[in-house]
Image: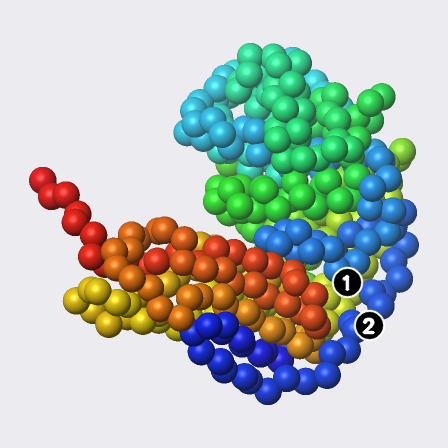
Amino acid sequence: MKKTILVFLAALLLLPAGNAAAADAPPETAAKAMIVLHGASGRVLAEKNADEPMLIASTTKLMTALVAAEDDLARETEIQPAWTTVEGSSMYLRAGERYTLYELLQGLLLASGNDAALAIAETVSGSETAFVERMNARAEELGLTHTHFVNPHGLDAEGHGSTARDLAMLMSAVMDCVPLREILGTRSCSIHNKYYVNHNKLLGKCPGVNGGKTGYTMAAGRCLVTSCQRDGLELICVTLSDPTDWEDHASLYDWAYESFGAFSVGEEIDLPAVPLISAARAEAQVSLAETPVLCLDKDSRVTVRVHLPPFVFAPIRQGASAGTAEILSDGRRIWETPLVWAENAGVDIPTG
């Protein structure tokens, strides 16, 4: 990325800029649906049938985990017989054993335990039905407009499904949750003398992959949601009904990191001071209201425009509006935030 900084009304600084070049097309995949997303900014780098509702198998458990993480993870529960009889993948719970919610989440996300999903649902909400209602409410809060859950484990059911785009947005929220991020990045663990290995084969094999969730039923096919971080840029990849999902995720990440890079707003924008009149100090400092990391084409021309007054009269109050900053990529505005005064000047601050 080549950067140009324009500070209007306060100063002018130009840095060398290069010619823009569009990123190469993403590699072909066998997936029926696919997306590569920069979750922090919402930028989609590649997609294919990303809004087509589909069966999602055990990737459902990402929402199960997100809802459960709102509870006390140290909370203990006694395993009930009904929870141990569910079909499919299991963490092999036994009736009468006691587990913390955190341990159940480990079994849910590493071993994809359907028994863990039921145990979590009834422990947290008292019934599977009540818990699923919370899952759907959380989906609505996250703006997952093509998602609906019928159960907490992902076994095929009428009306149960999501899209590649919605799952990528869900994974972004999951990775923002510290305990869930920790579990998803764990390759193996031992709980009650049982050894569990993370089903995510890309951990430790594909550079930067730091989390993910697998899913499979005969009807859904192979489903995979992963997260990857390289050079300060975290991306999410989702493939649905993809017989070559491991290879496809690895190739999509390699393509994405060759084509795109991180632009850390807080580090890249050097804000000028504004001359301050009628105050003890000569200048007033400003700060960004937001400091996100953006995902930009590596060969793009980046223009940063900072709009500030040529001077300001005291008093000014910390946090009050001072101006705006915007970022343009190849002439197209992609981000804007208010600038605020970084400190008080000429303001009487009550004490005591």
> At x 55% / y 49%, what residue is drawn?
186
Question: Can residue 209 be seen in this snapshot?
Answer: no
Image position, residue 64 (x, y; %): 62, 30
Would you identify the image quadrant in which residue 84 lies?
top right
User: Which mark is on residue 24?
Assistant: 2
**Gap in Å between the C-alphas at discs 1 and 2?**
12 Å
Question: With 99 as the anchor, is 222 left or right in this view?
Answer: right
Q: Position of residue 253 (x, y in %)?
A: 72, 63
Side of 145 relative to 191 (left or right): right
Q: Where, quadrant-wise, is the N terminus in this rendering?
A: bottom right
The disc at residue 72 is none
Amino acid residing under circle 1: Leu
Q: Helix, strand, or loop for circle 2? A: loop
Viewer-closest of 146 and 216: 146
- Residue toward you, 219 or 149: 149
- Tag 1: Cα neighbours inside 10 Å, few (<14), some, or many (≥20)? many
- Residue in front for this viewpoint, 199 or 249: 249
Residue at which label 1 appears: 252
Q: Nearer the viewer, mark 1 or mark 2?
A: 2
Q: Amino acid at mark 2?
A: Asp
Is residue 7 in view from this perspective? Answer: yes
